Every structure is written in structure tokens, then in C-alpha cells.
Image: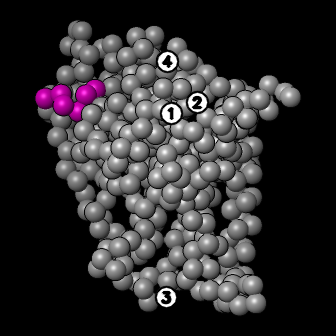
Amino acid sequence: MTDLEQFRQETRAWLEENCPRSMRTPVLSAEDQCWGGRNFKFQSEDQRLWLERMAERGWTAPDWPTEYGGGGLSKEQVKVLREEMDRINARPPLHSFGIWMIGPAILKFGSEKLKQQHLPPIVRGEIRWCQGYSEPGAGSDLAGLQTKAVDQGDHFIVNGQKIWTSYADKADWMFCLVRTNPDVKKQLGISLVLFDMETPGVTTRPIKLISGSSPFCETFLEDVRVEKDQVVGEVDQGWTIAKYLLTHERAMIGGFGRTAAGEKTLSEQAVECLGLEDGRLADDMFRAELARWDIDAKAFELTNERVTDEAKSGQGVGAASAMLKYYGTELNKRRQEMIVAMNGFDGLVFEGEQWDQGAVPRSMLRSKGNSIEGGTSEIQLNVIARNILGLV
């Protein structure tokens, strides 16, 4: 038996013993997900236990170094862990912008103090993060941001406004792009800073979208004090870090195109809605459309796996994140539209307990935002053309 086979057997046994049965069921809504944080309220004791048990092993961030609370697993072991979790339909123990975005940036660019301060609480799900990037006048042109950080010796004073800050009203800390030098080329005078959302001068206001309530907020920063030891990397060098972080965000958003662990597949939902005839989906036209989506989704899965393996081998994600982000969001939009179609008239009902308060059409409408957040589809296509296809 190889070491990897032994690791698989041990992982399978541990998951069978430690993953509660209720955590092997589909996630019903965003409220049913575990986001952690100072103010998070667990939906059940099983949800709390599942997070604690996985975090104790560092398996909420399985490939992070053990000295920062991670699992210290190799890329092959991480793949085995995910396969074994998928095998029992185990839910992710933690959804976290800390793990998906700011954590990798701190690992690569942060000081040892920042790593020790922030990474272990992220792994344990104790701190929930939000992202302060976009501004009312700086969306696709992110480098045009105007939020200013004025040097006050041992700290900065920050003033400005951020928009589309997902879950800012629920987050504990923000990673935020600020302008620390207005007298140089705009990409060269930006820094990435971290601060507690309870710092005086930080206020948030939720933004309601066409899909109903949404995670997005406006965030206002008025004379917010940020200590200099909370700068990630060097002052004025935040643009490089911001681009690195964006590759992780885009890969994360692209993941919306995949069926999450514990979630019913599109085929399973179609069978429930449309039924079978002679062992095949009853609706011929929808069956063909579903087959096309399944083929595209499988191709996307294989591409994502290849890019992930390349990243783990030290090549990084780079421009490939634009490809994953673009195609993953397009897949998710197609998926949501098909769910509306297979539900017929019920797929258009926007409220009522019988229809889960319109979860189907609201999810379809929400998916449209995937091609805007994290960089619009048009920007991603430009990146693909320039950096992957070499057309520019």
C-alpha cells in the first residue's frame, strides 16, 4: 500500500466517524452555510461540531502550513480529501473569504506578524472577512480608486467609500485597497491594508438587488485609523498583491459553475421536475440541452483540476483565473436558467412559502451578477485574449 492509499483509507475512516449525518445533506440556502465569525449563529450543533473537528485538523485550509493552523497536506492529499468528502456528500465545513482570498495573499506577501495574527483564526472560522476593492467610480478600472490613506507616523487615516462589499454588514475585518501616494502613476500608489470593522468611522449599508435581499453593501470610511503593521507587503506596492488576490477571487467565483458537494445535480433536479419515460428524461428537447450542459460542465471540471494542479506545482493561477471565472459564471447562468425552465410556471413564482419565497427565480436573477463581480466578463475576455491567446 502506498502512502497516498493509506492516507485515503485513514481519511475515509475519519470522515465516516466525524462528519455528522446532517452535514451530508444538500445546503438549502446561503443562510444554511457556515461562514464563521464573531457574530455567526450556528444553525445546529452538528454544524458547529463539523467546523470544530475539521478546523482542529487544519482541514478547513488543508494545504496551508501547519504553523499557521493549516493541514500541511500535499496537493495529492488535498485532492484525496476532497474526493472522500464528495463521496459522502459532506458539506464544506466553512465558507470563507479569508481562506479563498486574503489568506493566500497574507501567506505570500504578509509579514510573519500578520501571518501569526490572522491565519490561525481564519482556519478556525473565528474571523469573517469582506473585501474593500470596488468604489462608485472605480469598478472595472480598479486602479482608479480614490479612497485615501494619509500617513500619520505609526498609522494611516483612511477616508473614502467602497461599494459591492459582499457581507460587509456581517464581517469582522476588511482587506481594503487604499491610495497611499497620489503623486505617482495610479497603479504604483496603492496599498492593501487590514482593519477591524468595529473601528470607529466604519459604517455599512446593505444594497437591495432585483433578486431581493443580497449580500452587497456600501461601506463608508471616515477618519478610520489603520495601524501600519496591518499593511500587507510594502506600502505603495499593493497593486501587485491586489492582482494576485484577484486570481483567487476569480477562481472562486468561477466555482459557482460547479455543483457543490451535497447539492442535487442538475440531472437529479430535472428527473424530479420532468419525470422519466422509458428510463430517459421525458422532455426530449430539455434532455438534449441537459446533455450539452453536462458535457460543458465536465470539461470545465477537468480544466479547473488541471489549473489547480499547475498552481499547486508552483506555476500559479495567473491569467487562467480569468478563463475559469468567465466560463464558470456562464455555466452558472445557464444552469440557473435551466432550473427555472424545468420548474415551469412554478419557476417564476417570486414569493410564498410553498415556493421557498421564490428561491428559483431569485437565484437565476442573482446569477447575472456573477458576470460583473470579480471583474466583468468583458474584462476577462480581454485578459484571455491578451495573456492566454496572445491576440493583442
Q: Main secondary structure of the magenta part?
A: loop
Sequence order check, earlier mark of 1 and 4: 1
Residue 148, visible in the rendered structure: no
Task: Give the labeled residue for mark 4.
Answer: 68
- Work out whether mark 2 precedes mark 4 in sequence or the reverse, and give the earlier one: 2
Which residue is denoted by mark 2 in the rendering?
A: 62
Binning the other alpha carbons within 10 Å of mark 4 as few (below 14), some (14 to 19) or many (20 upward) gives many
Q: Nearer the viewer, residue 183 or 381?
A: 381
Label 2: which secondary element? loop
Q: Residue at x 24, y 45 (%)?
A: 169
Cα separation, mark 2 vs mark 4, equals 11 Å
Mark 3 against mark 1, which lies toward the viewer?
A: 1
Amino acid bearing label 1: Met
Q: Is residue 81 left or right of residue 56?
A: right
Asked if the residue at tag 2 contacts the one at tag 3, i.e. Cβ–Cβ closer than 8 Å, the answer is no
Along the line of sight, the residue nearer the viewer: 161 or 171: 171
Q: Residues within 10 Å of mark 3 (few under 14, many from 20)?
A: few
User: In the displayed structure, would residue 316 be above or below residue 270?
Assistant: above
- Nearest to the eye among marks 3 and 2: give it: 2
Q: Which residues are magenta?
A: 195-200
**Gap between marks 1 and 4 measured at Cα:** 15 Å
Whole-Å distance between the Cαs marked 3 and 1? 40 Å
> Which of the labelled discs sits on residue 344, or is there none?
3
- Above or below, 245 relative to 339: above
- Outermost residue to the front: 17
Front label number (1 vs 4)? 1
